[in-house]
Amino acid sequence: MSNVVSDNLPDAAGHFGPFGGRYVPETLMHPLQELEQEYFRAQQDPSFQTELSYYLREFVGRPTPLYFAERLTRELGGAKIYLKREDLLHTGAHKINNAMGQILLAKRMGKRRIIAETGAGQHGVATATVSAMFGMKCVIYMGAVDCERQALNVYRMKMLGAEVVPVTAGQQTLKEAVNEAMRDWVTNIRSTHYILGTAYGAHPYPVMVRNFHRVIGDEARRQILEQEKRLPDLLVACVGGGSNAIGLFYPFLEDNSVRMLGVEAGGEGIFPERHAARFQGGSLGVLQGTRSYILQDENGQIQSTHSISAGLDYAAVGPEHAWLRDQKRVDYSFATDDQALKAFVGLARLEGIIPALESAHAVAAVWELAPKMSKDTLIIVNLSGRGDKDVSQVATRIKL
C-alpha cells in the first residue's frame, strides 16, 4: 500500500501518477506558481495554522459531531452507521473549511477581490461568507440552470454582499461557471484570488483543497476511536469534484483495514448525457486545468451531464480520486436520482436530519450496503451538507 499513499504525491508538478498536472494558459502559470509557493509557506507557518484553527473553531463550528444514527441502523438491520455531521457547520456544508483556508491565503498575498464558481451554491455561500467577514469584494459565477434550482442560495450570496453572475453558455451548470471564473481570473490576476471549491483544477488546487478538508477525516478518526475503540470498516462519501470525500478518506488511506467508497451521481441511469458518473462512462482527458476521468465523446467533446443534485452535476472528477481508483485503494459506485430521493426522505423520517441531495447519494449507497453487513461492522458516512437548499426542488418530485 505504500506506493498508494505518499507524502510525495502529488509530485512537484502536481501529478498523482498519470493524473493531475497544470494545463492552463501561459497567463495563469505565474499566479498558480505564486499560489503554490504561498500555500506551502503557509502550511509550514505556525501563525497561519493558529489563525486557521481559531476561525474553524470559533466561526465555522468545528469540531463537528460523529453521530450514531441509531434508528437508521435499526431500520436497515445490519452495520452500525455513524454520520459525520458536516451539515452542522456555519453555512450548512463542508465547503467553508476550504473557503476559510483560502481567504486567509488571499489575505497573505494581498489580494482584495475574490472570485469563485459554484454548482449547488454551498461553495458560493461559503465564499461570500468569508469575503464578507474579511471585507473583500466577491463575485460568484453560477450556471443559469443552477441559479434556478438553487434560488435560495443565490439570495443568500447576494444577502452577504456578493455579486452573482448567472452563466448562460453551454449547459448552464458547473462546468460553464468554472470557465467564466477562469476567464475572470486571467483578466484580473493582480487583484484577484480564485477560491476554487473542489479538489480539482490545476496544481496546487487539488492538494490544497484536500489538505483544508482533511480536518473531516482527522476528526472522524479521533472520534470513532473514542466511541468504538477501533477504526471503522467502511467510509462512504458522495463524489462530485471530490472535496468532501477526499477530506474524509485521506487520513485513513494507510489503514489497510478501512475500506472506502465514493458515490457518484447516477442521474437517470448510465446512459450518455443522463448521468455524472465519470468512472462508469468516462475516459482519460484534460479539462479545466487537470488530467482526470472525464465524460466525453469519441472526439473529446465534453458530454452533457445530469444529476438531481447541482453539486454532483460535473463532467470530471478530482485527479486524486482517479489515482486512488486506479490503485484500487478506493471503490467508486453511483446512486441514481431516485435512490438519492428515497435516502433524502428516509433520513429525514428516521433521524430528523434533512441531508443535502449530494449527501443523500452517500446515504443511498449505505441503504443498499448496510443490510448485507454484520451488526459489528462500522460505517462512517460523510453528511457533507444539509438539505434546506434542496427542499423546494424535492417538493416538485415528491408529493407528501
Image (spheres, rainbow, N blue to C red):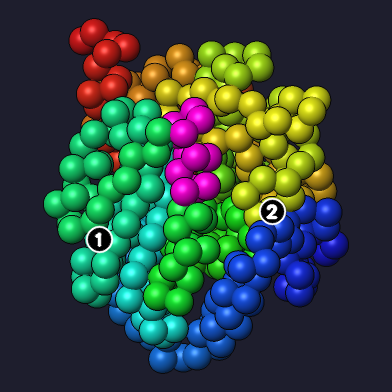
* Position above or below: 310 against 13: above
Q: Which residue is mark 1?
A: 129
Separation (CA) of disc 1 from disc 2: 28 Å
- Residue 25 in the image: state x and y as whole percent: 66, 61
Percent position (x, y) of residue 350? 30, 26
Is residue 373 rendered magenta in the image? no
Q: Quadrant of residue 236?
A: top right
Instruction: Find the residue positioned furthest to the front.
Output: 187
Residue 170 included in the magenta stretch of the image: yes
Lateral position of residue 192 relative to residue 349, left or right: right
Q: Nearer the viewer, residue 218 or 279?
A: 279
Q: Position of residue 364 (x, y in %)?
A: 48, 25
Point out residue 90 in the picture as x, y percentages from the top left corner. 25, 57
Other residues around mark 1 within 10 Å, as few (<14) / some (14–19) / many (≥20): many
The N terminus lies in quadrant: bottom right
Residue 189 visible in image: yes
Q: Residue at x 69, y 37 (%)?
A: 294
Type of amino acid under label 1: Thr
Asked if marks 1 and 2 touch (Cβ < 8 Å), the reply is no
Residue 187, relative to residue 87: is it above or below?
Answer: below
Q: Secondary structure at mark 1?
A: helix
Query: Is 33 rendered above or below residue 155?
Result: below
Q: Residue flagged by tag 2: what amino acid is it?
A: Thr
- Magenta stretch? 169-180
Tag 2 secondary structure: strand
The residue pinned by badge 2 equals 290
Q: Residue at x 85, y 62 (%)?
A: 3
Q: Please indicate whether residue 142 sits to the left or right of residue 21 in the image.
A: left
**Quarter occupied by the C terminus:** top left
Q: Nearer the viewer, mark 1 or mark 2?
A: 2
Crowding at dot 2, Cα within 10 Å, few <14 / some 14-19 / many 20+, comes out as many
